[in-house]
């Protein structure tokens, strides 16, 4: 699963220079790992719920699912890493459609 995700990310980032691709290689691996890990954690949370009833002797309480805690921590780092990775892509030139006046005047 991780290798598939690495391939997807490498394809998306194929437009960047070779130097940037080399520099981004480890970050791509980390983002791919986090993507797969987050999917696994999400599946566990969906199956077990974000909290569960914990009982130890006479004591009983609702506690956070450890997967939920890991997910919450990782999702922030994942978002930051993904932003960093995609900041390497070339910036698209803003599309200038004008203010519509020309189209109005020309009846379009």
Image (cartoon, grey):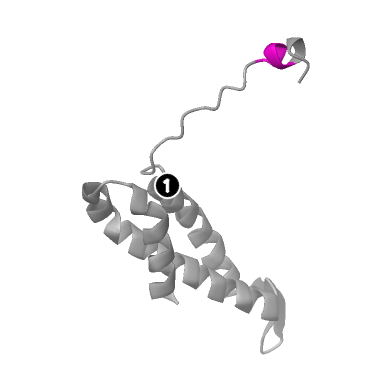
Report the number of numbered marks: 1
Q: Badge 1: few (under 14), some or many (20 or more) residues near its Cα, within 10 Å?
A: few
Q: Position of residue 2 (x, y in %)?
A: 41, 73
Residue 70 lies, with reference to residue 82, above or below; the image says: below
Q: Could you say which quadrant of the image residue 107 lies in?
A: top right
Q: Which residue is drawn at 52% across and 58% down?
A: 75
Q: Position of residue 22 (x, y in %)?
A: 23, 55
What residue would you read off at disc 1?
86
Q: Give the range drawn in magenta.
A: 99-103
Establish if 25 lies above or below 58: above
Q: Quadrant of the C terminus?
A: top right
Horizontally, is 73 left or right of 87 in the view? right
Q: Residue shown at 21%/48% (left/top)?
A: 19
Classify 48 as above or below 104.
Answer: below
Q: Is residue 79 above or below residue 98?
A: below
Residue sitting at 55 percent across and 71 percent down? Answer: 39
Q: In this view, does 63 lie to the left or right of 38?
A: right
Work out whether residue 18 or residue 76 is closer to the camera in this orientation and state it: 18
- Asked whether, in this view, residue 92 is left or right of residue 19, the answer is right
Residue 24 spot, x, y in % from top left: 29, 53
The quadrant of the image that shows the N terminus is: bottom left
Pick whichever, 19 or 27, lies toward us. Answer: 19
Quick one: SS at disc 1? helix
Residue 2 highlighted magenta (yes or no): no
Residue located at (33% from left, 57% from top): 27
Q: Main secondary structure of the magenta part?
A: helix
Residue that sits furthest to the bottom in the current view = 57
């Amino acid at each position: 699963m991780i290798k598939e995700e690495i391939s997807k990310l490498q394809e998306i980032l194929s437009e960047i220079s070779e130097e940037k691709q080399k520099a981004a290689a480890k970050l791509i691996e980390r983002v791919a790992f986090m993507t797969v890990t987050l999917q696994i954690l999400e599946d566990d949370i969906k199956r077990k719920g974000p909290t569960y009833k914990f009982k130890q002797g006479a004591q009983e309480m609702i506690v956070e699912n450890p997967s939920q805690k890991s997910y919450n921590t990782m999702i922030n780092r994942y978002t930051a890493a993904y932003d960093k990775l995609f900041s390497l892509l070339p910036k698209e030139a803003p599309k200038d459609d004008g203010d519509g006046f020309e189209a109005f005047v020309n009846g379009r």
